[in-house]
Image: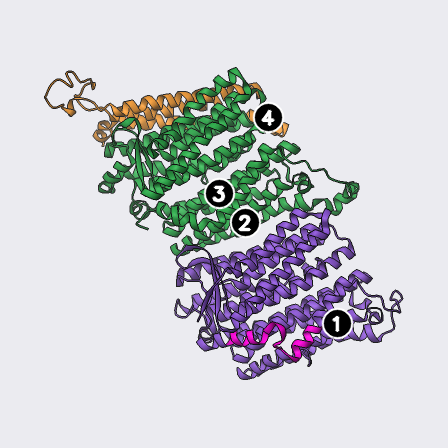
Chain colours: A green, B purple, C orange
C-alpha cells in the first residue's frame, strides 16, 4: 500500500494541475478548493511513506514496474521521506493561504496561477522523491519553469527579475545536466543506487571529478549559495505573496537536499569529503553568504526584501552543516532544512498578510501593527525569536547542532559566523518588532501626530484563510523546537550517512 | 545520592507559564481576574517549590527529564540544595512582587499592563527553570527565555531611553547567549556530558589553556547578567524600567540568574579543585574585588535613587561571586547565603524606591529630606534594608559578610578581607545619608507633616520583606531553611572536591 | 597534441559552442541575444549528449527479429539510444524555457519599450522602481 502512496505523491498533483484549467473554464471559484483538496493527498501520502520508512526502513518504488537501473525508481529513505513531509505540508499551508492573496492581486490570473502552483509542487516533490539523476533534472526543470512563470506575474519589476532568474537558473540546470552526462560516460547508469555501487571504483577518474564539480556548481546556483545568489533577491521579492511564501522556504531547501543526496548517497562521503577539497570551499562560501546576506538585509527598509536576504544567509547555515561533514553538523543541516522552511514560510506569510491589509512593506510604516493585527504580529515575533536562536523555538536547536558540528570539525570561524548571524538576526528582527510594537511613543512621532496616542486603534486582523496558516506555522516553530529531540532520534539520525 | 523522580519541577515551571497565557487571554477588560491569575500562580508556584524543600533537606535530589536529544544531551530538571535555594528565593519573592506590582501599576495607571504581567510571569517561569535545570543546556534554554521575557519589561515605558535601554540590554545579553552557546558546545564536545556535578566535571578533559578559555567564556556569558564589571553597563541603563521590574531584575530573577550561573560554573562545572589547579580562581577573585570596590564608589556618585541601588546591586553580586571564587568552605557558605539575604534586602530597597515614586513622584536622593515623617513605614523599611546591606547585625547581611570575611581568612588572602571591609564602608557611605536625610533633616516643602503612606498593596510587601531580613539575621534557618540548604550545598561541593 | 584535439573533436565543438553561449548570456546587453546565447548553450549540451551515444561503425538501434531469433544481440553494432532519448526530454525542457523567456521578454518590452538591458536599468532608476 505504501508503495502506491509513493506514486500518488507525484501523480496526483501532476494530473490535478491539468484539471485546474477545466475547472477554471467552468467556474473560477472552484480552483481554490480543488487545489487545497488535491494537496491534502500528497501530505497524507508522504506522512504514510514516512511512517513506513520509520517502521520498516527504506524502500523503493518502480515507476511503471520497470526494474532499476533501467526504469525510473523512486527512492524513499529517511531523508527523502522527511523532506517530502516538509514540502507537502508547507505547500498545503501556502495553498490554503493563497485564497485572498490571489483574489486580491491576480484576479484574472487565478487559473494559470493554480495550475502552475500545482506543477511547482509536483516538481519540488519529484526532486525529493526520485532515485534517478536524470529524472531529477526533469523535475528540477518542471519546478523551475513553473517558478519562472509564477514569479513573472508578480509586481513591478518582476519580468526583469524573472528573465535574470531564467538565464542563471538555466545555467545551473545545464551544469547539472552536464554533470549527469559525465557520470553517464563513466558509469553508463543514471540510477542513484546503481551509481553509488559503481562509482567507488572510479573515484580516481578525472571524468568523475568533473561531473562532481558541475553538480556542485549547478546546485549551488539553484540553492542560491553566495556568490551565485544574485538572481535570488529580486526574483523572490517581486513575486506575488503566495508565490514567495512557497518558493522562499522550499526552492533553496530542496536544492540543498539534492546537494546532500548527491554528496552523501550517490557519491560516498569519503569521496566528497576526503578526495575533493570542496567542503572547505563550500564552508567559506557559506560564511560569506551568512555575512553578506545579513549585511544586505540590514540595509533594507522593505520588510520582504530584508527577508529575502535572510534567505541567502540561511542557505549558508545549511551548507555549513553539510560542509563540516560530521554527524552533528549534518544533523543540524537536515534539521535546519525543516526549521528554516517553517520559519521562512511563516515570515513570508506574515509579510503577505501585512501587505494585503496595509498595502505596505516598509518597516517604518508598520506602527500600531501589534494592535491592528495582534495574532499576525505575535506569529512574526515568535518566528523572529526563533531566527535569533532563542529556545525553545526551533531555530535554537538547529543552530545548536550546527555549532556542535563546527566545533567537532575545528572550524572556529564558521562557528563564529553562525553566532554572529544570530546576533545580526536579532538586530534585524528587533528593529521590525520595535517599529511594530513601540513606534507610536517615539517623540518625533508624537510631535507631528501625537493625537493618535489616545486614539483607539481598531483591530483589523488578516482574513481567516491567511491567519490560520500563519498561526499554524508559528505554532509549528515552537512545537518543532520542543519536539526536535524526537524528530532527530526517530528520523534524522537515520538520514545521516552511517559512516559519520 | 537518592534520586526522586517527580514531575513537580515541571509543574513549578509551567504554572506561571500557563498563568502568563491566561493573563494574555483575560486582557485589560477584566483586570481583577487577570491579577488574580498572577497571584494564584505565584502562590501555587511557591507551594509547589516549597513542598519539595523537605525532600531536598533529606539529601535527595528530584529529577525530571523533559526530552533527550542525544546521549548526554537532554533537557532535564534536577533539584539539588543549591537550585532549591534559588527556587525558594525566586518563588517566595514573586508573591511579594505580585502584590506590589498591582499596587504600583494601578497607582501610576500604567499602560500595557497585560503585557507587563504576561512578561512578568514568563520571567518567573524561566527563572525557576534556571534554578532547577540539571545541565548546562537546560540552563541555557531557560536563560535565553529569561532574556527575551525581560525585554518587554525593560522597554515598558516605550520612551526613547526605554527603547535605548532595551537595545543595550539585548546587545549585552544576546551576545552573552551566543558566547555561552559556543562554550557549552565545546564542553559537550570535550566531555560528552553537560550535567552539573557538585565539585565539577571538567577536570582532565582538556589542556589548561582551553579550560581557561572556556571558563572565561562561561563567566563572561553569565557575568553579563550578573553585572560583573566590564559587562555591567546595561544594568544602570535598564533602570528606566518600572520599579517592580527593577526589583525583579535585581533581587529575584535576572541578575540572580547570572550569579547563579557563575556559581554553577565555578562550583558545579569546573569545581574548586580544578580552579585551584588552573590558578584562575585568584584572577576571578581580583576581578570580582575590582567590581566590588569600583561599583561602591560609582554608587556614591549617583543622585538617582534607583541608579544608586543598581550600583549597590553590582557591588553585592560581585561579593557573591568573590565568595565562590575564594573556594573555601566559609566563603562559599557566605556567598550562597548572600544570594538569599541580598535578595530580600535589595527587594525591600527597590520596593521603597517605587513607593516613593508612586506617592511623591520623586526619584532622586537629594529630594528625600524629611520624608521619614510622612512615610515612616517605607523609610523605616528602607533603613532596615540599608543597614542590612552594610552588614550590621542583627540584619541578615551581617551573617553573609561574617562568613565571607571568615572565608577570606581561611583562604589566607587578607587583601580580600580589606575588600569586604571597604565595601561595607562604602555601603554605609552611600546609604546612611539617605536615612539621615529622610529622618533627621528639615522636611522639604512638599512633604506632608503627617502620616500619608503609599498604597497598602505596596507598603505591606515591603514591610514584610524588611521584617524577613531581620528575622533571617537572627534565625538564618527560619521558614525557608536557607541556611540548611546552603550548608547542604556546600557540603556536597566540598565533599567531592 | 593535434591528434588529441582531433580525436575528441566532438567535445571541443560542444565546449566552443557552450562558451559562445555563455559569453552571449553574460556579455550581451540585448535581452534577446542573451536568450539566443542560452539556446546555444543548451544546444551545446544536447550535442554533447548525442555525440556520447555514438559508436564507430554502429547503426541505429532498431532490432530486427528481436523476440524471434535466438542469436545474442551484438551491442557493439548499435549506437547507445539512451542519451538520445534523454535529449528528447532536454529539448522539450529547453523549448519550454525559451517559451517562458520569450513571454517574459514581451512583458518587458511592453513595460519599457526596449530590450536593451542598460536602457531598462536607466528607466528603472529614473522611475525609482
Chain bearing tag 3 is: A
**Which residue is disc 1 drawn over?**
B381
- Is there CB contact under 8 Å for labels 4 and 1? no
- Is there CB contact under 8 Å for labels 2 and 3? no
Is B13 drawn above or below residue C78 in the view shown? below
**Which residue is disc 3 drawn over?**
A340
Q: CA distance from mark 1 to mark 2?
A: 42 Å
Is residue A206 found left or right of B479 in the rendered image? left
Q: Residue at x 47, y 25 (%)?
A: A116
Per the image, is B489 magenta?
Answer: yes
User: Are discs 2 and 3 located on one and the same chain?
Assistant: yes
Main structural element of the magenta stretch: helix, strand or loop?
helix
Chain bearing tag 2 is: A
Quarter of image, res C35: top left
**Which residue is disc 2 drawn over?**
A388
Query: What percent of the width, then of the height, locates residue B408?
Result: 56, 81
Q: Report the front residue among C115 and A437.
A: A437
Disc 1 packing (10 Å; few <14; some 14–19; many ≥20): many
**Which residue is disc 4 drawn over?**
A105
Secondary element at tag 1: helix
- Is there CB contact under 8 Å for labels 4 and 2? no
Is A100 drawn above or below residue B346 in the view shown? above
Mark identifier at residue B439: none
Q: CA distance from mark 4 to mark 1?
A: 65 Å
Query: What span is in magenta?
Result: B467-490
Disc 4 packing (10 Å; few <14; some 14–19; many ≥20): some
Amino acid at each position: 500500500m505504501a508503495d502506491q502512496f509513493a506514486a500518488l505523491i507525484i501523480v496526483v498533483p501532476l494530473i490535478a494541475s491539468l484539471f485546474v484549467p477545466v475547472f477554471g473554464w467552468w467556474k473560477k471559484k472552484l480552483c481554490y478548493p480543488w487545489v487545497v483538496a488535491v494537496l491534502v493527498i500528497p501530505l497524507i501520502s508522504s506522512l504514510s511513506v514516512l511512517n513506513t520508512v520509520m517502521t520498516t526502513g527504506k524502500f523503493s518504488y518502480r515507476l511503471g514496474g520497470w526494474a532499476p537501473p533501467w526504469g525510473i525508481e523512486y527512492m524513499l529513505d529517511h531523508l527523502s521521506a522527511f523532506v517530502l513531509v516538509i514540502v507537502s505540508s508547507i505547500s498545503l499551508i501556502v495553498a490554503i493561504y493563497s485564497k485572498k492573496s490571489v483574489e486580491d492581486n491576480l484576479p484574472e490570473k487565478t487559473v494559470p496561477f493554480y495550475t502552475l502552483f500545482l506543477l511547482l509542487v509536483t516538481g519540488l516533490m519529484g526532486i525529493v522523491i526520485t532515485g534517478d539523476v536524470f529524472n531529477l533534472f526533469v523535475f528540477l526543470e518542471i519546478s523551475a519553469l513553473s517558478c519562472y512563470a509564477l514569479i513573472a506575474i508578480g509586481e513591478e519589476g518582476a519580468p526583469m527579475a524573472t528573465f535574470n532568474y531564467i538565464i542563471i537558473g538555466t545555467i545551473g540546470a545545464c551544469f547539472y545536466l552536464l554533470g549527469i552526462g559525465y557520470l553517464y560516460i563513466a558509469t553508463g547508469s543514471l540510477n542513484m543506487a546503481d551509481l553509488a555501487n559503481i562509482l567507488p571504483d572510479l573515484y580516481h577518474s578525472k571524468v568523475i571529478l568533473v561531473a562532481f564539480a558541475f553538480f556542485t556548481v549547478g546546485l549551488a546556483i539553484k540553492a542560491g549559495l553566495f556568490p551565485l545568489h544574485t538572481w535570488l533577491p529580486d526574483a523572490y521579492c517581486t513575486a506575488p505573496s503566495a508565490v514567495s511564501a512557497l518558493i522562499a522556504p522550499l526552492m533553496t531547501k530542496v536544492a540543498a537536499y539534492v546537494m546532500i543526496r548527491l554528496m552523501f548517497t550517490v557519491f560516498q562521503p569519503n569521496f566528497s569529503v576526503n578526495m575533493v577539497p570542496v567542503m572547505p570551499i563550500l564552508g567559506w562560501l557559506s560564511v560569506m553568504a551568512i555575512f553578506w546576506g545579513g549585511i544586505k538585509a540590514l540595509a533594507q527598509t522593505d520588510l520582504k526584501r530584508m527577508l529575502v536576504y535572510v534567505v541567502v544567509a540561511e542557505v549558508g547555515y545549511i551548507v555549513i552543516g553539510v560542509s563540516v561533514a560530521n554527524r552533528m553538523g549534518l544533523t543540524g543541516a537536515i534539521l535546519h532544512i525543516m526549521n528554516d522552511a517553517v520559519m521562512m514560510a511563516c515570515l513570508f506569510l506574515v509579510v503577505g498578510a501585512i501587505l494585503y491589509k496595509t498595502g505596505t512593506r516598509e518597516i517604518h510604516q508598520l506602527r500600531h501593527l501589534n494592535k491592528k493585527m495582534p495574532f499576525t504580529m505575535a506569529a512574526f515575533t515568535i518566528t523572529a525569536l526563533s531566527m535569533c536562536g532563542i529556545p525553545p523555538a526551533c531555530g535554537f536547536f538547529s543552530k545548536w547542532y550546527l555549532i556542535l558540528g563546527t566545533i567537532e570539525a575545528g572550524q572556529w570561524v564558521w562557528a563564529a559566523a553562525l553566532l554572529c548571524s544570530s546576533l545580526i538576526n536579532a538586530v534585524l528582527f528587533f528593529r521590525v518588532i520595535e517599529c511594530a510594537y513601540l513606534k507610536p511613543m517615539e517623540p518625533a512621532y508624537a510631535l507631528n501626530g501625537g493625537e493618535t496616542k489616545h486614539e483607539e486603534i481598531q483591530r483589523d486582523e488578516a482574513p481567516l484563510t491567511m491567519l490560520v496558516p500563519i498561526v499554524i506555522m508559528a505554532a509549528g516553530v515552537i512545537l518543532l523546537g520542543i519536539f526536535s529531540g524526537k524528530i532527530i532520534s526517530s528520523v534524522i539520525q537515520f538520514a545521516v550517512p552511517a559512516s559519520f | 545520592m537518592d534520586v526522586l523522580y517527580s514531575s513537580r519541577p515541571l509543574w513549578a515551571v509551567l504554572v506561571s507559564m500557563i498563568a502568563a497565557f491566561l493573563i494574555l487571554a483575560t486582557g485589560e477588560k477584566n483586570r481583577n481576574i487577570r491579577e488574580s491569575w498572577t497571584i494564584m500562580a505565584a502562590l501555587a508556584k511557591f507551594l509547589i517549590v516549597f513542598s519539595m524543600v523537605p525532600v531536598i533537606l533529606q539529601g535527595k535530589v528530584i529529577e525530571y527529564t523533559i526530552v533527550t536529544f542525544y546521549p548526554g544531551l537532554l533537557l532535564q530538571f534536577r533539584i539539588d540544595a543549591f537550585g532549591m535555594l534559588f527556587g525558594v528565593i525566586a518563588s517566595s519573592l514573586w508573591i511579594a512582587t505580585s502584590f506590589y506590582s498591582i499596587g504600583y501599576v494601578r497607582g501610576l495607571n500604567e499602560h500595557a499592563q497585560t503585557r507587563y504581567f504576561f512578561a512578568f510571569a514568563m520571567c518567573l517561569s524561566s527563572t525557576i527553570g534556571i534554578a532547577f535545570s540539571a545541565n548546562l543546556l537546560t540552563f541555557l534554554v531557560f536563560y535565553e527565555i529569561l532574556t527575551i521575557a525581560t525585554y518587554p519589561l525593560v522597554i515598558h515605558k516605550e520612551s526613547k531611553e526605554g527603547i535605548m535601554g532595551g537595545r543595550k540590554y539585548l546587545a549585552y545579553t544576546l551576545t552573552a547567549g551566543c558566547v555561552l552557546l559556543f562554550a557549552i558546545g565545546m564542553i559537550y564536545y570535550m566531555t560528552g556530558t553537560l550535567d552539573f556535578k557538585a565539585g565539577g566535571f571538567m577536570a582532565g578533559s582538556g589542556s589548561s589553556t582551553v579550560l581557561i578559555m572556556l571558563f572565561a567564556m562561561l563567566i563572561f556569558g553569565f557575568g553579563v547578567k550578573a553585572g560583573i564589571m566590564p559587562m555591567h553597563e546595561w544594568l544602570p541603563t535598564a533602570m528606566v524600567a518600572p520599579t517592580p521590574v527593577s526589583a525583579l531584575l535585581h533581587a529575584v530573577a535576572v541578575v540572580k540568574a547570572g550569579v547563579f550561573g557563575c556559581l554553577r560554573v565555578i562550583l558545579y562545572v569546573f569545581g574548586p579543585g580544578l580552579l585551584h589547579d588552573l590558578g584562575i580562581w585568584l584572577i576571578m577573585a581580583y576581578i570580582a574585588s575590582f567590581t566590588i570596590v569600583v561599583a561602591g564608589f560609582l554608587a556614591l556618585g549617583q543622585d538617582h535613587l534607583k541608579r544608586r541601588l543598581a550600583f549597590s546591586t553590582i557591588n553585592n553580586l560581585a561579593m557573591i561571586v568573590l565568595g565562590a571564587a575564594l573556594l573555601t568552605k566559609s566563603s562559599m557558605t557566605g556567598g550562597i547565603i548572600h544570594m538569599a539575604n541580598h535578595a530580600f534586602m535589595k527587594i525591600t530597597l527597590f520596593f521603597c524606591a517605587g513607593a516613593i515614586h508612586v506617592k511623591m513622584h520623586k526619584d532622586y536622593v537629594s529630594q528625600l529630606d524629611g520624608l521619614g515623617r510622612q512615610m515612616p513605614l517605607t523609610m523605616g523599611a528602607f533603613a532596615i534594608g540599608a543597614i542590612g546591606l552594610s552588614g550590621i547585625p542583627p540584619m541578615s547581611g551581617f551573617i553573609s559578610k561574617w562568613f565571607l570575611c571568615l572565608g577570606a581568612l581561611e583562604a589566607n588572602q587578607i587583601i580580600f578581607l580589606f575588600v569586604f571591609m571597604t565595601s561595607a564602608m562604602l555601603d554605609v557611605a552611600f546609604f546612611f545619608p539617605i536615612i539621615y536625610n529622610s529622618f533627621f533633616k528639615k522636611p522639604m516643602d512638599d512633604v506632608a507633616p503627617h502620616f500619608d503612606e503609599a498604597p497598602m498593596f505596596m507598603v505591606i510587601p515591603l514591610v514584610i520583606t524588611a521584617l524577613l531580613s531581620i528575622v533571617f539575621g537572627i534565625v538564618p534557618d527560619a521558614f525557608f531553611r536557607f541556611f540548611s540548604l546552603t550548608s547542604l550545598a556546600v557540603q556536597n561541593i566540598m565533599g567531592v572536591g | 597534441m593535434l591528434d588529441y584535439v582531433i580525436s575528441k573533436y566532438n567535445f571541443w565543438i560542444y565546449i566552443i559552442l557552450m562558451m559562445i553561449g555563455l559569453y552571449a548570456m553574460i556579455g550581451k546587453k540585448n535581452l534577446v541575444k542573451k536568450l539566443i546565447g542560452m539556446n546555444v548553450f543548451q544546444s551545446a549540451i544536447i550535442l554533447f549528449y548525442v555525440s556520447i551515444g555514438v559508436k564507430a561503425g554502429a547503426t541505429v538501434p532498431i532490432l530486427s527479429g528481436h523476440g524471434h531469433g535466438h542469436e545474442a544481440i551484438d551491442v557493439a553494432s548499435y549506437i547507445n539510444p539512451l542519451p538520445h532519448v534523454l535529449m528528447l526530454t532536454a529539448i522539450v525542457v529547453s523549448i519550454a524555457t525559451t517559451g517562458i523567456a520569450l513571454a517574459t521578454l514581451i512583458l518587458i518590452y511592453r513595460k519599457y519599450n526596449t530590450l536593451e538591458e542598460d536602457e531598462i536599468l536607466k528607466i528603472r532608476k529614473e522611475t525609482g522602481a
